Amino acid sequence: MSTHVSLKEAERKAFRTAFQDGLWDIFIGCVILQFAIAPLLSRRLGDFWSSAVFLPFWALAFLATWLVRKYVVRPRVGVVKFGASRKTRLIRFNVVMLVLNLVAFILGILAALTFGAVPGWTYPIGFGLIILVGFSVAAYFLNFTRLYIYGALTGLSPLVGEWLYVVMKAPHHGFPITFGATAGIMILTGLALLFRLLRDYPIPTYEPTSEKEIG
Amino acid sequence: MTDQQPGQVTLHPLADIDQVIHAPARLMVLTYLYVVESADFIFLMRLTGLTWGNLSTHLTRLEEAGYVTIEKEFKGKKPHTVIHLTEQGRAAFREYKKSMKQVLDDLPD
């Protein structure tokens, strides 16, 4: 192994510590949960409000993970600021995600305009592919490998849901089952990682070692 | 060079290796500091697996050599120690890398 590679690996290892607490898994799981629950609420609240009602839920989930990171995780694992190369990588990631969101938005409008004119499987396949690409891009730029698995699970959710709907007449195109299971896997993984971190990394206590410090 | 026996490998560059960096624990600390902008004491402790006392001793040695700066501040009532690699430390690490690579590349298989 060359020195160059091991330095890269050291940087990756340092960066990956940002994802060892499971809080991102929990937050993304909470976001995905919307796709499972919104269809159940749509009859009572309508399409718009059944989704909009999740905005305060997301805000609350974000605030909760931020508070846990600040007051529970950081005192245990510490704080690091990354160098220029990582900052450049994060800027590239943001640009790519912005472009991807714009493409998804345009495709969403096209889907709404052509609803009923294209075969039924087109929407779940398109939706699943966009999700898969989005998660994979994030996994690549953030060195957050679990996102590849989450991307595959989330990307397959609309397809499997549609299959459940066609074969077993599952309500709401099977979304509550497939997205619910995906969100559940993410949230449980996140919680397991968080509890492991709390178990393995107690808040360090100061230990004076030098003679001067001991006095 | 004329004193060299046949088959003997010259290891002169080893004599120039920076002994402050060459200690495994300090090398580990400098490697991580080389790839980030700054890190606090706890982060380095977790990443290197060193104990509080060990890390403290090695950081003091690196600070004395001018390779790192240690900033102590208070966050609320709790002390918070942030460590940066200095330009001198960065240059010394690069030089160390170069010297070690030269030594290891020159060794026969």
Image: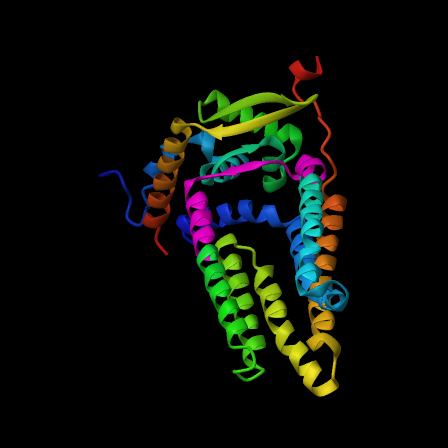
**Residue A22 visible (yes or no):** no
Magenta segment includes A83: yes
Residue A62 seen in the current view: yes
Residue B24 screen position, x and y as percent: 52, 38
Q: Which residues are magenta?
A: A70-96
Left or right of B79 in this view: A7: left
Q: Position of residue A33 (x, y in %)?
A: 70, 61
For the point 59% across and 36% down, which residue is it? A79
Residue closer to the observer: B75 or A34: A34
- Majority SS type along the magenta span: helix
Q: Residue at x 63, y 40 (%)?
A: B46
> Which residue in the rendered view is the most extreme toward the top?
A215
* Along the line of sight, the residue nearer the viewer: A38 or A31: A38
Where in the figure is residue A130, as x and y percent of width and height? Answer: 52, 68
- The image's colour scheme reads rainbow
* Residue A64 placement: quadrant: top right
The answer to if A77 sits in the magenta stretch is yes
* Picture layout, residue B53 above or below residue A182: above
Q: Residue at 45% of width from left, 45% of height from top? A: A86
Q: Please name the residue shown 43% across and 53% down the image.
A: A95
Q: Is residue A159 left or right of residue A141?
A: right
Horizontal and vertical percent position of residue A27: 67, 52
Is residue A118 toward the left or the right of residue A201 in the image? Answer: left
Say above or below: A163 vs A209.
below
Quarter of the image that includes the N terminus of chain A: bottom left
User: Residue A116 occupies which quadrant of the picture?
Assistant: bottom right
Q: Which residue is nearer to you in this view: A178 or B17?
A: A178
Residue furthest toward the left? B2
Q: Residue furthest bottom?
A: A167
